[in-house]
Image (cartoon, rainbow, N blue to C red):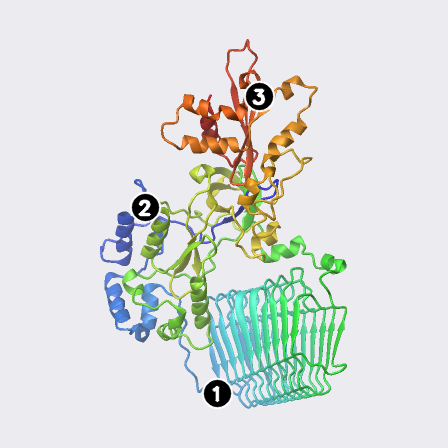
Amino acid sequence: MNSHGGGCFTLLFLFCISVTSMALETNPFTPKAALARYWNKEIRSGGLPTSQFLLSKASPMTAVQSATFAKLAAQNALSTQLPAFCSAAGLLCFPDLSPSLEKHDKDSNFAVYSDKNFTNYATGSAGGLDSFKNYSDGENLPVDSFRRYSRDAAGHNDRFANYAPGTNVADQSFNTYGAGATGGEGKFTGYNEQINVPNLKFTSYADEGNGRSHDFTSYNKDSNSGNQGFTSYGKNANGAPNEFAGYGENANVIGSGFTNYGETGNGANDTFTSYGFNGNVPQNNFRSYGDGGNGGVDGFASYRDQSNVGDDSFQSYAKNSNAAKVNFGNYGKSFNEGTDKFSGYGQGGVGSKIGFKGYGVNNTFKDYTKSPGAVTFAGYTNRSSSSSSAEMKVSGSLVNRWVEPGKFFREAELKKGNAMPMPDIRDRMPKRSFLPRTIISKLPFATSHIGELKRIFHADDNSTMEALIANSLSECERAPSPGETKRCVGSAEDMIDFATSVLGRRVELRTTANVEGAKRKILIGAVKRINGGEVTKSVSCHQSLYPYLLYYCHSVPKVRVYEADILDPSSKARINHGVAICHVDTSSWSPTHGAFMALGSGPGRIERETMVLLDDDEGLETLDCADETRDECMKDAKIYYPSRCLELQASPSQKATCDYHILSTFFYKKLQQELSRKGSGKESLFVKFRRWWKGVNLFEKAYILIPIHEDLHWSLVIICFPEKDNKSGPMLLHLDSLKLHYSRVVLEDITRID
């Protein structure tokens, strides 16, 4: 860490829930009773009761239900009873929507409405207006389908205002919406704002439409982790203006795909204003966009401006088009560079004009049209521009939008009496339960079997269910980071097995007690250092979004674990008890990790950028090992830095200060090695180590200084000898500004050679 911030990043566990006591099932054959027996058999808890947290996640099925569905799973027939299985097992499942032949030929106004399948709605309508306001407001798992909506209509208007705000895991699809329609307008205002894990699909939207406009304003604003897809949108349309304003603003990890958008259209006019503004890692993919179009005009203004990283890909954009005009103004001016790829852009076009003005850095142009005057670059930012770098520096307010305050903090902040923000640790995932091992052992869990998984859980192509299954499998199959041991577990028994394989059978499951204090200032109370604050082994488990409860469990090297009381800052009353884990080694983390955004620095640098001895040594030269490995740094002569600094600070005019001897930095490490051997007594230790003070009478010195270096942190032991007429004996002091070294152990080691 840096010189004043502790040795690592710390974060609160995010799977924290309220833990309540519960009685064990009276039926010994239920999944919950079986889990309790398994815990007692595998865990040596020293008399601690079965973890109530884990029991609360067990399958709620009865013994009969568990046996019935296990038999169906063995027969590969679970999909035939999916609704009953999902209900009994507490799973995440979407309803099966069946097409409706019902027709609607009158104007409609939908207010405070939810979960509806619109098929053949307003087909062939002439004029009129349909309005959707406060539709699916705040719902969990809403599924809405618009198929053949406003097809072949003339002058018909659609309004979607405040549609599905604040929803969780939404699945909404627009298929052949407005296809072949003439005139009229489709307007989306405040659509899917503040939504979690959206999956929105526009397929054959406004295909072959004539003069029908579509307007997306404040679309998907402040949303989290999902995808929108536009396929064959406006294809073969004539004079159809489309406007995206405030699309995906302040969104987190949102992906948008435009495939065959405006293909072979005539006189298309598409405008993207403040698209992806202030977003975190936005992903936008334009494939075959505007291909074969005639006289189209596309404008990108403030596109992905002030975003963090993110990637855009334009493949075969405006290819073979006629008289296309495309303007990119203030495009991709991110504070933290993303990647923009243009492949086959404008190729084969006739009379096309493409302009880039005020464009960001880190861009790739491949197979680009080379027609004279077809492409112009003005105000293109290059990496060496100091003004551009200053312009793109991130502000604290922007970081707070991407990384919630309090989610990451330095180890030094975790001390009694410190006030700090607490992030929102409320569980936003849909409620699910583990599956019994008798069932989960019969289900496939691999990308190679995704077809079978889609069949079991009734996941249509390009549906939300398909996406969440694929994403979870991809994360679980990802190669572990250096030093990481990982496993995805879908049963509580599997979680126990993984934890004991890493930690042994004497383990304790820890979670934050409840969600009190979330999203406000809290005060840190008493802090408990697990394993005395030393680096220890731990297993952390984080929820993944999957039909049944799935945890990504992993163990990483070099962590410290803490428990802390959380107090109300006004009354000082205890409101919660939290668990935090401190990552000492961040060398394998991504440069865009939220911890680096919130706290600064980068992978592998934050632990060893500056190493100092005391709190008040700001005037001293720091030990910079940012470009060296830890082992190389430890072998370097710079390891003697603390001794040299102390010598320089000593004043020769003060006898009491100068009457000292400083032992080498390696002394304590060698002492620890010797103490670990059997039969090391005081006399033998004194004899073995006296070469460290050869030629010096230690007992005539006023002070003996022993620098301690462990886990990339310095502390200092001072042995103070009293005057000769003072019979009190020597006094030992351990100066550790961050309290990272265990003083009792350090001082006991030192006294072994007195």
* Of the pair 512 and 2, the residue shown nearer to us: 2
Q: Identity of the amino acid at label 2?
A: Arg
* Residue 489 locus on image (x, y percent): 37, 59
Q: Is residue 147 visible?
A: yes
Point out which mark residue 505 bears: 2
* Of the pair 703 and 633, the residue shown nearer to us: 633
Residue drawn at the location 54% of the way across and 88% of the way down: 151
Secondary structure, mark 3, is strand
Mark 3 or 1 closer to N-term? 1
Q: Is residue 521 visible?
A: no
Alpha carbon separation for disc pair 2 and 3: 46 Å
Q: Identity of the amino acid at label 3?
A: Tyr
- Residue at numbered disc 1: 103
- Mark closer to the observer (2, 3): 3
**How busy is the neighbourhood of tag 1: few (under 14 within 10 Å), some, or many (20 plus)?**
few
**How busy is the neighbourhood of tag 3: few (under 14 within 10 Å), some, or many (20 plus)?**
many
Q: 374 left or right of 600? A: right
* Residue 610 locus on image (x, y percent): 61, 42
Residue drawn at the location 64% of the way across and 32% of the way down: 645
Q: Identity of the amino acid at label 1?
A: Lys
Q: Is residue 226 above or below residue 145?
A: above
Q: Are marks 2 and 3 in contact (CB under 8 Å)?
A: no
Please tell me in which quadrant of the rendered image residue 276 appears: bottom right
- Residue at numbered disc 3: 703
Alpha carbon separation for disc pair 3 and 1: 94 Å
